Image (cartoon, grey):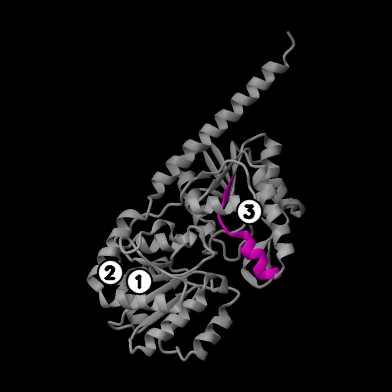
Amino acid sequence: MKIGQFTDTLLPVVDGVGRVVSNYAQAMGRLCEACYVIAPQQKNLYQGSLPYEIVDFSGIPLPKLQQYRAGLPALDAHYLSRIAQVQLDIAHAHSPFIAGREAYRISRRQGIPLVGTFHSKYYDDFYQYSHSSMLSSMGNRLVIDFFSKCDQVWAVSNSTAEVLRRYGFTGPVEVVENGTDRKEPDIQAAQMVEERFNLGQRPLLLYVGQMNWKKNIRRILEVVDVLIRQGRDIRLIMAGQGPSEQEIRALSAALGLEDAVVHAGHITDVRLLDGLYTRADLFVFPSLYDNAPMVVREAAAVGTPSLLTRGSSAAEVVRDGENGLLADDTTADMAACIAWALDNPVRLREIGMAAWATIPKPWEEVITEVLARYEDLIRTMQRSRRCKTRLRLPL
């Protein structure tokens, strides 16, 4: 089987979709005849010793989102020459935008099935940058138009599928979860984190993700402010980059949290990131925007529990007090929840081990399911073609 993974984000951009596509391609490049990743050109993209091939088209940074790039594959002669030599059996789009439209073009040109995965709350993205309900609704219609053209539509969780339906999609949606491999906690990496950030034995709260107000980061800083005022000697490490980074740093300073909050920036060192997850007492992720965040699964993969907002899409995998913690989206409730967690370290570790046992789904299991779905869809399309050919034959 020759597979095309189409995405608008790819490593070294370490957002959830980019990591999902990377894991898909790593496994499929080893298990299948060929796997291609079609994406805009990324700065500092390493292409050596990969089990898959990257076919990239020219890209430019997006305004206010410099870590992301966009391009027009139809205007890139070099890309068009390369992609014309690639014959696929199936195309999988992880974005309804430029890469997704290119996946649709290729699928129709080559007569192959197209799978589209719905990952994000795009309406929220449109509104954040346009501040217009009308423009955001227009953007949503483009999203629905794309998924309506796919031969099969996937969502990464049940709550994500419900978001897509609320957007107006009326077709069938299959839930195909993302994977995360469980890991042995890297104690040496955790000690490296302690030394690098001068933590000592202080309790550590961790946030990993975009530095973007849509992630409900203001709530995190307000909660830490409350805990510090209660006399708790804690540290919060915030790892990531994004359009609100300078404003977030400014709010942290305005609250007088310079000694309590570490802005670690964009972390590309996998071992350092694993060390942060391992050393953290609690992963704090109150986002109301995210659907099925990879970071919650990555924390659980080393036995670190997460605090999520009750009722959020991200909270679908958590049972409060069993394999994670849930709180209302108020500063008081989240602060009380964290205070309880820090006062009950033994119980918190038990919750972390339950998260390790129940939340991660090994990538091997995910990819096995995905490949079976691909093969079934390919066979279905081939049978449909044969049936149509027979119906057209003269008697």
Above or below residue 210? Residue 123 is above
Instruction: State whether residue 203 appears in this view.
Output: yes
Instruction: State whether residue 263 appears in this view.
Output: no
Magenta range is 116-130
Above or below residue 186? Residue 390 is above
Is residue 125 within the magenta segment?
yes
Looking at numbered disc 2 in the image, what kind of residue is underneath it?
Answer: Leu
* The quarter of the displayed image where residue 153 is located: top right
- Label 3: which secondary element: loop
Is residue 60 within the magenta segment?
no
Residue 320, disc: none
Spatial CA distance of label 3 from label 2 is 37 Å
> Left or right: 188 with respect to 93?
left
Q: Position of residue 324 (x, y in %)?
A: 35, 64
- Label 1: which secondary element: strand
Looking at numbered disc 3 in the image, what kind of residue is underneath it?
Answer: Tyr
> Left or right: 364 with respect to 393?
left
Report the residue at 54% width, 58% height from top: 18
Residue 348, disc: 2
Q: Residue at label 3?
A: 167
Spatial CA distance of label 2 from label 1 is 8 Å
Within 10 Å of the Cα at label 2, are there few (<14), some (14-19), or many (20+) other Cα atoms?
many
Q: Earlier in the sequence, mark 1 or mark 3?
A: 3
Which residue is situated farthest in the right direction here?
75
Report the residue at 44% width, 63% height from top: 295
Circles 1 and 3: CB distance less than 8 Å? no
Above or below residue 161? Residue 247 is below
Q: Split into 4 quadrants, where in the image is the C terminus?
A: top right
Looking at numbered disc 1 in the image, what kind of residue is underneath it?
Answer: Leu
Q: Residue at label 1?
A: 282
